[in-house]
Image (cartoon, rainbow, N blue to C red):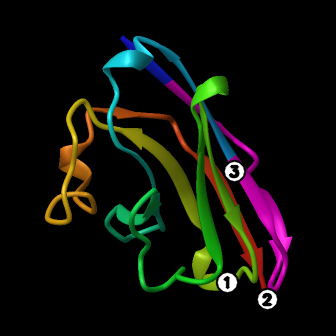
Amino acid sequence: QVQLVESGGGLVQAGGSLRLSCAVSGRTFSLSNMAWFRQAPGKEREFVGGSTAYADAVMGRFTFARDSGRNSVYLQMNSLKPEDTAVYYCAASRTGLGVRNIRDPSAYAYWGLGTQVTVSS
């Protein structure tokens, strides 16, 4: 099995920065794509970013990074806005994903429990 544990969330003022981390353990050799998603209250879970794509809403502000040696992925979030407030989830797939399904939550087999990010205005 695979375990994903997110950390680094918190409360930050608009314009500030946060760095999320996701520690991966277990059968890490079985993983392919990794990505970050988020879910705000009353909204569906949405793709944030991965190694090859970002959501339009975060382009130029968020940066995805993967450290295979440490079995970790990161999300550097700059110029945060109140609309970035959500629970952020780390996700991993078992197979390689293309442009058609990299943004689809159902394409990812493993999920962390999430970390809350709150941006105040």
* Disc sitting over residue 20 in the figure: 3
For the residues marked 2 and 3, what is the alpha-carbon distance in whole angstroms?
20 Å
Please report contact status of discs 2 and 1: CB closer than 8 Å, yes or no. yes
Q: Main secondary structure of the magenta part?
A: strand
- Residue pictured at 51% horizontal, 36% vertical: 113
- Which residue matches tag 1? 82
Q: Is residue 4 above or below residue 25?
A: below
Q: Is residue 119 above or below residue 35?
A: below
- Which residue matches tag 2? 121
- Residue pictured at 68% horizontal, 43% vertical: 21
Nearer to the camera, 38 or 93: 93
Q: Is residue 105 left or right of residue 75?
A: left
- Residue pictured at 26% horizontal, 58% vertical: 102
Q: Which residues are magenta?
A: 4-20
- Residue pictured at 19% horizontal, 46% vertical: 107
* Disc sitting over residue 105 in the figure: none
* Magenta run includes residue 15: yes
Nearer to the camera, 113 or 68: 68
Q: Which amino acid type is shown beneath numbered disc 1?
A: Pro
Q: Is residue 95 above or below residue 8?
A: above
Q: Is residue 45 left or right of residue 100?
A: right
Residue 56: x and y in percent read: 43, 85
Sequence-earlier tag: 2 or 3: 3
Q: Tell me the element at label 2.
A: loop
Q: Tell me the element at label 3.
A: strand
Q: Which amino acid type is shown beneath numbered disc 3?
A: Leu
Sequence-earlier tag: 2 or 1: 1
Q: Which amino acid type is shown beneath numbered disc 2?
A: Ser
